[in-house]
Amino acid sequence: MKKKSYAHGVSSHSLLGETIGENLRNTVNRFSERDALISVHQNYKVTYTEFWQQAETVARSLLAIQVQKGDRVAIWSPNRFEWVLVQYATARIGAIMVNINPAYRTSELAYVLGQSGSSVLISALSFKGNDYRSMIEEARSLCENLREIIYLDKDWDGFLDRADLVSIGKLNEIE
């Protein structure tokens, strides 16, 4: 029988024995109407309850595009609220989020996507004058596992609409 490992450094506080999703659910239960996430530059502000619901929608959308436990979902974007939603959604379904430095050049992008085996890339269209879209197209031929690209400023709403294809019950079966 396998035993789970547990170790922590010198501290009076032990590690939490819960998943990221369980931790968020417990926080929602305790602080449902408190602010959970604010992005001033995007004019975005949600409570924990709203954040939970939006993260569920992203998780169901990922399932709808056939992302499964252990799959890599890359995100290439500067700070924005969608980034945090993807982080919690991937954790919820057991996928692995690959965070790509927004300052990367095309060769670095290709390396990370190829090395990580990412099958989905969620990306901004541009950042600091860099045309991410053209850089992705150039790098794509070197990334054999990459099958889906979602641009936050172009495809996000359509991506979220795919959540309707997966029930909450199906999502809850994964936990």
Image (cartoon, helix red, strand yellow):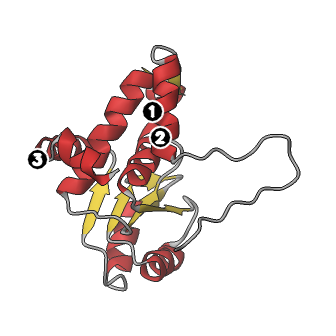
Q: Check disc 2 and give the amino acid type.
A: Glu
Q: Position of residue 134 (x, y in %)?
A: 35, 68
Q: Secondary structure at mark 3?
A: helix
Residue holding disc 2: 22
- Residue drawn at (49%, 53%) of the image: 127
- Residue drawn at (64%, 44%) of the image: 16
Q: Secondary structure at mark 2?
A: helix
Judge from the rendering whether residue 104 lies leftward or rightward of residue 49; answer left or right: right
For marks 3 and 2 on the same chain, the one whose residue lies earlier in the sequence:
2
Q: Check disc 1 and give the amino acid type.
A: Arg
For marks 3 and 1 on the same chain, the one whose residue lies earlier in the sequence:
1
Q: Are marks 2 and 1 in contact (CB under 8 Å)?
A: yes
- Residue drawn at (15%, 42%) of the image: 167
Whole-number angstrom distance, CA of label 2 to CA of label 1: 5 Å
| Residue 148 to residue 150: above or below | below
| Residue 77 to residue 43: above or below | below
| Residue 96 to residue 20: above or below | below
**Quarter occupied by residue 150:** bottom left
Res. 158 in view: no
Q: Position of residue 23 (x, y in %)?
A: 52, 38
Q: Residues within 10 Å of mark 3 (few under 14, many from 20)?
A: few
Q: Position of residue 8 (x, y in %)?
A: 78, 56
Whole-number angstrom distance, CA of label 3 to CA of label 2: 24 Å
Q: Nearest to the eye among marks 3 and 2: give it.
A: 2
Judge from the rendering whether residue 85 lies leftward or rightward of residue 10; answer left or right: left
Residue holding disc 1: 25
